[in-house]
Structures are given as structure tokens and as C-alpha cells.
Image (spheres, rainbow, N blue to C red):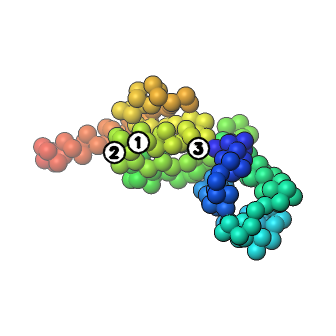
């Protein structure tokens, strides 16, 4: 989610504390302690805000917004990979370099076609700049999403899998 969406959802939320906790944990992927340190807000103040004991004053709200802006900009650009957990376990790097720019890779596990569609929609809502997925899924995603969809073409894996199936079905010869 981009900075403006995060701030809007925070300010417009009926429960500021719960929404702030969700943003810090899920969107920024930070601990409450780290967020307090980065925002230059005491932990006790932040915990009072999170528990609903206290409403933020303008100065505190500004510090929170600046910290969300700082860290949401760092996490905006990523490519989502929609696949089964076993396929995702093959990932060895969570960054790709394009020129001098590093782009994060985010995993979105799915164990069924329906889960894969839901994961892809979630990835787009989370701010994915593109989605990498299986060939059977890409035509559907291209119809419902507004980000580039790239299909995994597992040529070597496909050939190896066919050989294994042949050996299991027709013997070792």
C-alpha cells in the first residue's frame, strides 16, 4: 500500500490504535519498539496510542506520518511471486537487480487455483509492481489485474518431470 493510502486508512479509522498496529506490523513489517525509535516517540506513548488510552496530538501524529512515509517508500517496489510453498522454497534471493536498482521479491503462497487468484489480488492491493505466476493462472490474472503478469516457463523442470513420470510409469529402461 502506498503512503497516502496508509495515512488515510489510519486517520479515517474508527480505532486509531488497532489500525496503527496493523500498519506497523503488516505494512511496514516493523516491531512496535523499532517504530517508536524511528518515529522518536517514547514506547510508553506509542503503547498508550495502540491501546486506545490516548489520542495522538498533532506533533505525535506528524512523527507517525513521517515514519510511515519513510518506511513505506522503502517498501513500495516489489515483484510478487504466486506459487505453491514447495515452489517458493526454491527461491534463493529476495531481491533482483535491474541496472543499479534493487527490487524486492515477495512470496504469496497458494495451494489451489482459487487461493492463487486471491493471493494475486492481495499482491496487487499490497502494491506489487508485477506478478510472476504459473501459466494456468496468468490468463485469468491478466483479465482482472492492472499490473504486468509474467508467466513462469519451467522448461527444464517440465522435461525432468516428464522423464520422472515416464520412469515411474514405464520402468527404468
Residue 6 visible here:
no
Pick whichever, 39 or 50, lies toward us.
50
Identify whether 16 is placed above or below 74.
below
Q: Secondary structure at mark 3?
A: helix
Q: Which percent across, then down, holds residue 68?
A: 74, 52
Q: Secondary structure at mark 1?
A: helix
Task: Residue at 71% x, 70% y: name it.
Answer: 53
Please give the residue where the numbered disc 3 appears in the rendered image. 126
Please give the residue where the numbered disc 2 appears in the rendered image. 112
Pick whichever, 117 or 49, lies toward us.
49
The reply to whether discs 3 and 1 touch (Cβ–Cβ < 8 Å) is no
**Tag 1 or tag 3, which sits nearer the N-term?**
1
Residue 35 visible here:
yes
Q: Is residue 125 left or right of residue 172?
A: right
The reply to whether discs 2 and 1 touch (Cβ–Cβ < 8 Å) is yes
Label 2 crowd (10 A; few <14 / some 14-19 / many >=20): few
Task: Residue at 58% x, 51% y: name it.
Answer: 94
Amino acid at each position: 500500500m502506498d503512503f497516502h493510502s496508509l495515512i488515510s486508512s489510519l486517520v479515517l479509522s474508527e480505532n486509531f490504535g488497532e489500525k496503527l498496529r496493523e500498519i506497523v506490523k503488516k505494512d511496514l513489517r516493523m516491531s512496535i519498539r523499532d517504530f517508536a525509535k524511528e518515529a522518536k516517540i517514547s514506547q510508553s506513548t506509542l503503547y498508550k496510542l495502540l491501546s486506545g488510552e490516548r489520542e495522538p496530538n498533532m506533533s505525535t501524529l506528524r512523527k507517525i506520518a513521517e515514519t510511515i512515509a519513510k518506511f513505506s517508500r522503502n517498501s513500495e517496489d516489489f515483484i510478487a511471486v504466486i506459487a505453491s510453498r514447495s515452489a517458493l522454497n526454491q527461491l534463493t534471493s529476495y531481491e533482483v537487480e535491474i541496472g543499479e536498482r534493487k527490487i524486492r521479491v515477495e512470496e504469496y503462497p497458494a495451494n489451489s487455483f482459487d487461493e492463487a487468484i486471491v493471493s494475486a489480488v492481495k499482491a496487487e492491493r499490497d502494491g506489487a509492481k508485477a506478478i510472476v505466476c504459473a501459466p494456468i493462472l496468468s490468463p485469468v490474472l491478466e483479465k482482472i489485474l492492472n499490473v504486468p503478469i509474467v508467466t513462469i516457463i519451467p522448461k527444464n523442470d517440465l522435461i525432468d518431470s516428464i522423464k520422472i513420470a515416464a520412469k515411474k510409469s514405464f520402468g527404468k529402461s
